[in-house]
Image (cartoon, coloured by chain):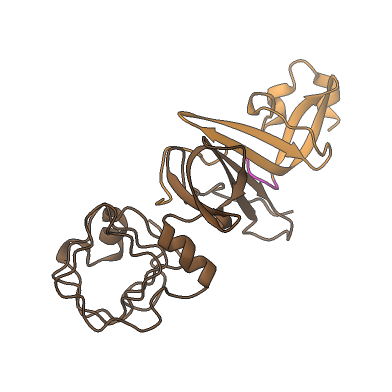
Chain colours: A brown, B orange
Amino acid sequence: MPVLTNKPVKPKYTVGDTVFAFDSGSILQLTIVQVQIIVTNPNNDSNGLQTNYYTFSENSLKLSEAQLASSKNHLLGKAKGAYLNDVPFESVTGLQFDNPGQADLACFNLAGLDLSAVVINANTIADGMSLDGNAGLPTAVDTKSEFRAVVKSYDENTTIWVDGNPIGRS
Amino acid sequence: MKYSGTYPSVTSLQVGATAYIIYQNLPREVTIDKTEIVVTSGNEKVKYYFVEFPGVGFDPANVFADKATIKTDFQTDVDGL
C-alpha cells in the first residue's frame, strides 16, 4: 500500500459555518458543530480517499459534504444540475453583488459579462458560478487568488474562472 | 466555506505508513489503514486504524513511527519485529 502524503486536506466547510441541505423537499439551514474526516485508500493509489461528514447544532443529522451547499441558490443549482439561469445574462449594469441576502450568486451563469463596475466582496457567494469569458472584473478580484480571498464562498471545482477552468483552491 | 480554518491538521502518520504500537501487552508492527479526525470548536482528535486490527482506533500518543521508541520496555520482542 503506498504511503499517502499531506492528508487530510481542509474540508470545504468548517465548524461554525452556516450551510444548507434538503429535508423532505424543504431547505434546512444548519450550523456545523463537528466535522469528521476519514482518510482511507481503497484503490491503493497515491491519492487515497477523503470523506468529510458534518453534524449540526439544530438536529442529529450527519451529512456528507456532497449533501451540503453554501447557500440556498447553491443547493437549488446542485439539485437542478445546471445553472439557475437557463439563458445567459446580457448585462448586469447597475447590479450590486455585495449586500447580505442579495449576494447569493451561486450557480448563476455570468459568462461573458463585464463585471468591472460591480462590487464583489465578503458577502458574495460564488459556488457553482461561471465567470467564463468575462470581459472584466473589479481590479481587487481580478486574479484567482484575490477572488478566492475576498468572496464569502466558492467551490474549487464548480466555480468557473474567466479562463473557463475551475477556480481551484488556495 | 473556503477550505480554510485551523483544523484539521495534516496527520503526523499517513495511511499506508508502517507504525509501531503496544497491543495486548506486546509490541506490534502495523500498517495504517485509516485515519479519522474529528474537529469540534477549537480542537481536533485523531484516531489511527490498522490493517492488522480493523475497527480498533488508537490515539496518536500510542502510535509510533520508530520502533526504537517502544524498544525500552520490549527489547527482545521489538528486535524480532
Please give the count of numbered marks on the rendered protein.
Answer: 0
Asked whether B15 falls inside the magenta stretch, the response is yes
B53 or A22: which is nearer to us?
A22
Identify which residue is drawn at 23% across, 62% down. A97
Most distant residue in the top direction: B73
Q: Position of residue B45 (x, y in %)?
A: 58, 30
Which residue lies at the image location 47% right of the left edge and 65% below the top edge?
A76
Given residues A95 and B58, the one toward you in this image is A95
* Of residues B20 and B40, the one drawn nearer to the viewer in this rendering: B40
Image check: B31 left or right of A162?
right
Q: In this view, does A12 lie above or below A17?
A: below
Left or right of residue A64: residue A127: left
Q: Which residue is drawn at 29% across and 54% down?
A: A101
Residue B23 location (% of width, % of height): 82, 25
Q: Give the range drawn in magenta.
A: B12-16
> Which image quadrant: the C terminus of chain B?
top right
Classify A40 as above or below B50: below
Q: Identify the main secondary structure in magenta.
A: loop
